[in-house]
Image (cartoon, helix red, strand yellow):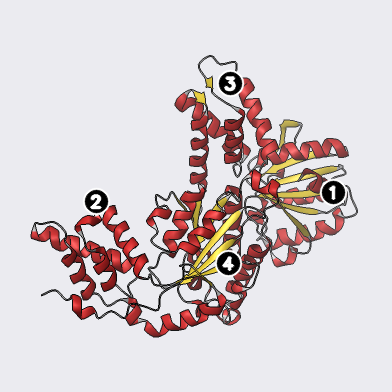
Amino acid sequence: MQNDLEVYIQARYPLIYLVSWEEERILKTLDQIAIHLRKMLFVWTQTQGLYNYVLPDHLDESKSDPEVLLNHIAASQDNGIFVLFDFHAFIENHRIRRQLRDLSKLLRKSNKTIIIVAPQMTIPLELSKDIAVMDFDLPGLAELNIAFQNALKVLNKRRDVVLELTPQISEKLLKAAQGLTLVEFENVLAKSVVHSKAINAHTIQEVLEEKKQIIRKSSTLEYFSPDENFEQVGGLENLKQWLTKRAEAFTERAAQFGLPTPKGLLLVGTQGCGKSLTAKAVAAHWNLPLLKLDVGSVFSGIVGSSEANMRHAIKVAESISPCILWIDELEKGFSGMASSNFSDGGTAARVFGSFTTWLQEKKKPVFVIATSNDITLLPPEILRKGRFDEIFFVDLPEQVEREAIFTIHLQKRHRTTDSFDVVKLALLSEGYSGAEIEQAIIAGLYDAFEAGRELTTDDISNNLRATVPLSRVMAEQISALRQWAEKRARKASRNRSAGTGIDLDRFSVN
C-alpha cells in the first residue's frame, strides 16, 4: 500500500481519495513517504485548521474554512502533501467541487498533492475523472505482529500481567485479529489485560468478540454464532460430503498443497428443506464466522447509497475473512434486474453487477452460500460458471431422510425414538419438508401438553394429516424446479427412490 501511494504522489496525481477509518496509521505512512520524497506533510481538519505534521502545536485555525483552505493550497509554494480529513462532507458544495477541479489542473504542474481521507467514498460525477481512489487496506499479519510485539515489550515489564503465549497461540491470535484496525487490535489487547490480567488463548476469543462488534455496527450484515452442526441436518449426504471434504481448505497446509480457496455454493430448492440450516451447520463444522447479508437493507437509505452499502458489506466480510457469507433467498434481493433502468435508474443493476463481479474475482477467503427457492426469478448472470463452485438442488426429503429428520427433532425435544414409530411417521409425511415435519411435532407436543400426557405417534400423525404440504400447494412449481435441476445442478441427496406410492388413508387414526 505504501509503495502504491508513493507512486501516485511521485506521478503527480493531484487528488487522491483514501477510504479508511485509520487516520493515525495513514499519517504515519504518509510521514514516511514525505521523508523519503523530501516533502512537507500538512494536515487539515475543520476543528483544528491546518498544521504541519512535525509541528502539531502550530495550528492555523484561520484555514478551518474549506474554501479558504483550498485557496491557500493553490497559492502555496510548499513542496507538500496536504491531508484533508473528512473533506467528503464538503464535496457536495458546488463551489468546493469547482475549486477542486480548478486545483486539479494546477497541481499537475506543481509538487503538491491533496489527499482526502474519509471512511466512506463520496465522489460527485464532475470529479470522477480528477480523483484517484484507493482503499487503504487494513493491517496485515506483519504489521499486526509489530504492534503485538511492541505491546508485549511494555507488558513484560508489568508484574501484574501474565503472558501465557506459545508460537501457536500467537499465530492464532494474529490471524484472528486480521480485519481489525491497529487501534481496535490495541483496544482488545488492553481489554484482555484489564479483564483477565493476562494475554493468553482466551484473548483469541476477545478478538472474535471485537469482530462481532464490527458486524453489529453494519446495517447490512448480521453476525451468527450457530449451534447447529451436520448431525442436525437430516439427509443431504452428497452436499454434506462435498462440504466435509473442503473443511480444511482455508488452512495454510491446503494453500501449500496448491488447493484453491473454495468460492461458494448456490443451494436451490423448495423452502423448508434445510438450505439455511446447512449454511449455519457449515460455519460450525468449519469453525468460521458466519455473516448474513441482508440484500434488502443494501437498497434502503438515501439515493445513491446502495452501491456504497454493497461495497461496505463486501469490505467488512473480507476484513473478517476467512468467513462464510450467507445470502438467504437470493432471488428476493436481486429480482427485477431487467426493469432496473426504468424503475430505479439502474441502481439495482449496478449493485448486482458489482456483486457478481466480486463473486467472480474475489481474492479473499470469503465462502458465499446463497439460497434460492425460485430459480426463475434469478438473473441468469448469477448462474454463470465461476460465480460459485457448485449449484446443489435440495429436494423434498425421501423416506430415509424423513426418518432421520423425525429422529433429530424428537431428540432435540428430549424424546427417545424408541417411544415412536418413526418409520410410520416417515411414510405418512411423504412430500413434506423438514420444516413441516418439525411443525407437526411441535403441534403434537401442544396437544399432548394440553391433555396432560406424553407425546405419542398418533399426536404427530394427526397433525401431519391436518397439514397441506407445500408439495401439494406448489406441485407445479416444484415439478418445474426438479426439471430445471435435472441437468443443471448436483443433487444434495443420494440417489432418490421414485417415491413410496403409499396410501395415506391406511394410517388414519380412528
Nearest to the eye among marks 3 and 4: give it: 4
Q: Compared with residue 97, is residue 374 higher up or lower down, i.e. above or below? A: below
Q: Label 3, label 2: how many angstroms apart (C-alpha)? A: 49 Å
**Residue 218 point in image, percent of width and height:** 51, 53
Pointer 3 with pointer 4, Cβ within 8 A: no
**Residue 193 point in image, percent of width and height:** 50, 26
Q: Is residue 437 left or right of residue 182?
A: left
The residue lying toward the viewer, choosing from 259 and 419, is 419
Identify the mark at residue 414; answer none if there is no mark. Answer: 2
**Alpha-carbon neighbours of circle 4 within 10 Å: few (<14), some, or many (≥20)?**
many
2 or 4: tag closer to the N-terminus: 4
Q: Which quadrant of the view contains residue 508?
A: bottom left
3 or 2: tag closer to the N-terminus: 3
Nearest to the eye among marks 3 and 1: give it: 3
3 or 1: tag closer to the N-terminus: 1
Q: Which residue is mark 4?
A: 390
Residue at position x 60%, y 73% in the image: 383
